[in-house]
Image (cartoon, rainbow, N blue to C red):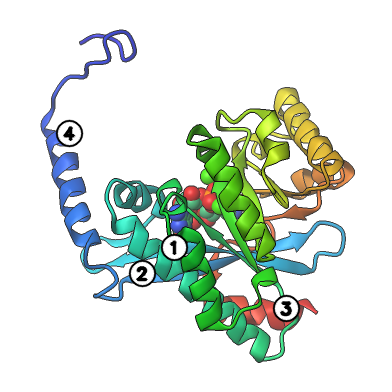
């Protein structure tokens, strides 16, 4: 067997065949997740690093598969992105998250922003802006309490189109976050042209921030750059007090991570909201 890389061929094994079959059947099941009501939205708090108040939350999909149990979005989102499934699933998350946020506001909790992940494929739909406007209208959520998380891969496509869409969203007062920042290929000059409110440091830089000087330097640089470009900076995947303190020293604004809370079902999130302020 040749090394991976070079010619990039791998030995065919029965277990790979099995994996492939599994994937194919998951892909088939994906078409019915909405009809079968198998999707759930979990919420993870985004916390002010200085006050520890909950400033917002990220909506994260969960798939409760009748046979396979809970399936991670890291597995099924890429599958859904290969076909149009991601469009209806994406619309459903957006509507569910906006509706939930509005309900919490109506119940009297301090209003916070809900962040929803948007796939490139969704963003590129010609009616994307109209769809977001429609969902906001239907759910009656004030647009300033919605944040859309996009990734740098958006910049690989038509830059002028991307800028145009982002500006329309900004005009509607919707917030934009650049997710997984530093892992993609976007040029820094785009960052300035895109109407970005929030820069999210990818958890791969946060993980070893205490032990790895390079990661520490990268995180510190992203924070300094975000601050000087008037963006808020959020660190993802904060699991320890040491990471939190380091990020606080560097003037990071917000943190998300297991140290404060993992993503939780809406009922549990509401309990945190009740305690927060
Ligand atoms: P992401 O947008 O980068 O989301 C952050 C991921 O980090 C989440 O994984 C979250 O559960 C996890 N995480 C949070 N805190 C910690 C921590 O302290 N340590 C560690 N190790 N992990 C932490 P999750 O929920 O499995 O989601 C994986 C990815 O799936 C997301 O990465 C996002 O790219 C995608 N995804 C999830 N929901 C949606 C969605 O509604 N739409 C789209 N397009 N993508 C989604
Ligand atoms: Ca995200
Ligand atoms: Ca992320
Ligand atoms: Ca990620």
Counting from the top left corner in percent of width and height, residue 72 is at 39, 55
Marks 3/2: CA–CA distance: 25 Å
Are circles 2 and 1 on residues that touch, CB within 8 Å? Answer: yes
Pointer 3: what residue?
Answer: 111
Q: Secondary structure at mark 3?
A: loop
Pointer 2: what residue?
Answer: 39
User: Does the residue tagged 1 have its C-beta within 8 Å of any atom of ligand 1?
Assistant: yes
Are circles 4 and 1 on residues that touch, CB within 8 Å? Answer: no
**First in sequence: mark 4 or mark 3?**
4
Q: Secondary structure at mark 2?
A: strand
Q: Is residue 258 visible?
A: no
Marks 3/1: CA–CA distance: 22 Å
Counting from the top left corner in percent of width and height, residue 16 is at 17, 34
Pointer 1: what residue?
Answer: 61
- In the image, 244 versus 98, the foreground residue is 98
Marks 4/1: CA–CA distance: 27 Å
Marks 2/4: CA–CA distance: 27 Å
Q: Quadrant of the C terminus?
A: bottom right
Counting from the top left corner in percent of width and height, residue 18 is at 14, 41
Residue at figure coordinates x 42%, y 54% from the top left: 126
Q: Name the side, left or right, on which 71 lies relative to 162.
A: left
**First in sequence: mark 2 or mark 4?**
4
Numbered tag placed on residue 16 in the rendering: 4
Give the label, 3 or 2, closer to the camera. Answer: 3
Q: Secondary structure at mark 4?
A: helix
**First in sequence: mark 4 or mark 1?**
4
Residue at figure coordinates x 65%, y 71% from the top left: 143
Q: Secondary structure at mark 1?
A: strand
């Amino acid at each position: 067997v040749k090394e991976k890389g070079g010619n990039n061929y791998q030995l065919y094994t029965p277990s790979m065949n099995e994996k492939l079959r599994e994937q194919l059947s998951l892909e088939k099941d994906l078409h019915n997740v909405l009809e079968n009501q198998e999707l759930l939205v979990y919420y993870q708090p985004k916390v002010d690093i200085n006050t520890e108040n909950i400033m917002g939350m990220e909506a994260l999909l969960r798939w409760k598969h009748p046979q396979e149990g809970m399936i991670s979005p890291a597995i099924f989102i890429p599958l859904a992105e290969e076909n149009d499934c991601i469009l209806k699933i994406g619309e459903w998350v957006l509507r569910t998250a906006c509706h939930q946020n509005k309900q919490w506001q109506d119940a009297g909790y301090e209003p916070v922003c809900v962040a929803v992940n948007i796939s490139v494929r969704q963003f590129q739909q010609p009616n994307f802006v109209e769809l977001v406007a429609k969902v906001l209208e239907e759910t009656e959520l004030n647009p300033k309490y919605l944040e859309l998380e996009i990734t740098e891969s958006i910049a690989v496509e038509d830059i002028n189109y991307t800028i145009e869409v982002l500006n329309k969203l900004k005009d509607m007062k919707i917030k934009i976050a650049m997710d997984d920042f530093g892992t993609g290929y976007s040029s820094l000059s785009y960052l300035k042209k895109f109407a970005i409110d929030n820069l999210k440091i990818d958890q791969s830089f946060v993980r070893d921030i205490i032990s790895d000087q390079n990661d520490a330097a990268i995180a510190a640089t992203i924070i300094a750059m975000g601050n000087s470009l008037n963006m808020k900076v959020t660190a993802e995947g904060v699991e320890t007090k040491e990471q939190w303190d380091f990020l606080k020293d560097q003037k990071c604004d917000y943190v998300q991570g297991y140290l404060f809370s993992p993503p939780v079902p809406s009922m549990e999130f509401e309990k945190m909201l009740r305690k927060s302020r």
